[in-house]
Amino acid sequence: MRGNSGRVALPYGLLTRLHRVRSRVAPALRHVMYGGRPSWTREPNTLPWFDQPDALDRIDGDDGDLLRAWVRDGYVVVDGLVDLADIDAMVATLDALWDAPAPLPHLVMLDLRDAPDSPPRNVPHAEVLEWDRGRCERVRAASDWRIHGFHYVNAPARRIFHDARLGAFASRLFGRRARPFAAINFMKGSRQHLHQDMGVFHIYPHNYLIGAWIACEDVASDSGPLVIHPGSHRAPFFAGFTDYPQTNLRTADDDLAAAYEAYVEEVAARYPREEFRARRGQVLFWHGMLVHGGAPVLRPGSTRKSMVLHYTVRGADRAKEVRGPVRW
């Protein structure tokens, strides 16, 4: 079919398959063309404008106060960028996954537990629907479950992922065009350890990474809200990742990963701690170096529904050039 521009518009499923093929072929082509050398070894590590010494002097325009807060604190909160109807439709589908009439193809539900103290498993949606009602209820209650890439199988999630308003705001922060490249849906408080997203992704040049945390319901103080440490994005990156972006939490061994986590805790202790008690539809954009995590869930059974997007710029995500093995 053809869009308004007259160009042929490929079905979304075909585009997804083409992207996967390109993802497999691209590393091999780079190896042939460059002898296996990663591309970042041939490029300068030039930081984004907001991490330059004169960042505050570069700010002008009507959104100057917001940009100054971004430089100073490493995060900003914005209203009115996401359609509430899309949020509600997406969440309704997520809530109904446990007793859906048919499985969603290729969907995997992550961190499912048969009991609170049992090890987590990643389970295909089709397998979950084969369980009896009692097991579904038990696993749902015991699990801080989440889904990666829901936008591949759900139209409202896809509209949010590609929303032009979110992308335009991230682009304004970068000072160049932003590209979404990862999405996670959380249904409960994550209880995540403190971390920096730069330690999870493989980004070069450094710091071309922005997270966008979208509240899909009002967040109560006892349901495990997002924790942030304003200003912590200005701390130096962990010195143990000497060949980053090759080495980060995904590719580090256990000892190095533990040393990184201890370093992040030490950084967090030097900056104030805040909890984001969000209203439905609010979006918190954060710097890739900002220390953040999940607060304890104090009310058993409570939810903290959210969608997290990540943005980078063209060519900065180097994950496909990284050598394994990886931790996840």
Image: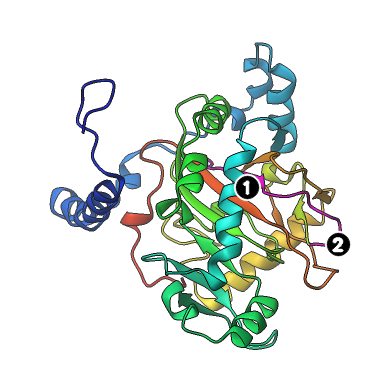
The answer to if 292 sits in the magenta stretch is: no
Question: Type of residue at label 2?
Answer: Asp
Question: Type of residue at label 1?
Answer: Asp
Residue placed at 77% from the left, 43% from the top? 279
Q: Position of residue 110 (x, y in %)?
A: 53, 71
Is residue 211 placed above or below 82 in the rendered structure? below
In this picture the colour scheme is rainbow
The N terminus lies in which quarter of the figure? top left
The answer to if 209 sits in the magenta stretch is: yes
Dot label at residue 88: 1
Q: Position of residue 223 (x, y in %)?
A: 80, 62
Start-end of magenta stretch:
206-223
Name the residue that disc number 2 marks. 222
SS category of the residue bearing label 1:
helix
Farthest-out residue, left: 32
Residue 130 is at least partly visible in this image = yes
SS category of the residue bearing label 2:
loop
Residue 238 is at least partly visible in this image = no
Q: Position of residue 151 (x, y in %)?
A: 45, 51
Tell me which numbered mark, 2 or 1, is placed earlier along the sequence: 1
Residue placed at 23% from the left, 58% from the top? 24
Dot label at residue 67: none
How many discs appear? Answer: 2
Q: Quick check: 306 left or right of 123? A: right
Cα distance, mark 2 to mark 1? 22 Å
Q: Nearer the viewer, residue 163 or 193?
A: 163
- The mark closer to the camera, 2 or 1, is 1
